[in-house]
Amino acid sequence: MIAWLALAFRSGSILFALAWAVLLLRGLRAHKRDFRLTEVWLLLEGPVDLPRARLQALIGGLLRDTYLRFADFAAWWAGGLLIGAILLRFAGLA
């Protein structure tokens, strides 16, 4: 039964690391994505009176910060699960 727990920790660590990589890449490329093709733009109601360059900077920066924040969370979870799997292995439970 404990072997399944160790496998779950290792698998979770790998999947969170994959999620981290995807979120990191999306975060690094978010400022280049056209703001009119984002979900944030679709959720805005009414006309927006800002220039396109300013909207691109605002929405791109917001998406970048959000992606990178959740990439940080995913990295912490991946590390925590990896440490848990290592501890289970050293305890002889895996």
Image (cartoon, rainbow, N blue to C red):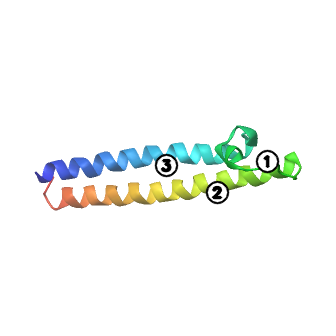
Left or right for 7, reference 49: left
Q: Residue at x 64, y 57 (%)?
A: 65
Give the vertical position of 14 relative to 66 (above or below): above
Q: Residue at x 33, y 57 (%)?
A: 81
Quick one: SS at disc 1?
helix
Spot occupied by residue 30 in the image (x, y as percentages of width and height): 68, 45
Total numbered circles = 3
- Residue 57 or residue 85, whichever sits in front: 57
First along the sequence among labels 3 and 2: 3
Task: Read off the residue under disc 3.
Answer: 20
Left or right for 83, reference 52: left
Task: Read off the residue under disc 2.
Answer: 65
Quick one: SS at disc 3?
helix
**Cα separation between marks 3 and 2:** 14 Å
Mark 3 Cα within 10 Å, few/some/many (few <14, many 20+)? many
**Residue 56 tag number:** 1
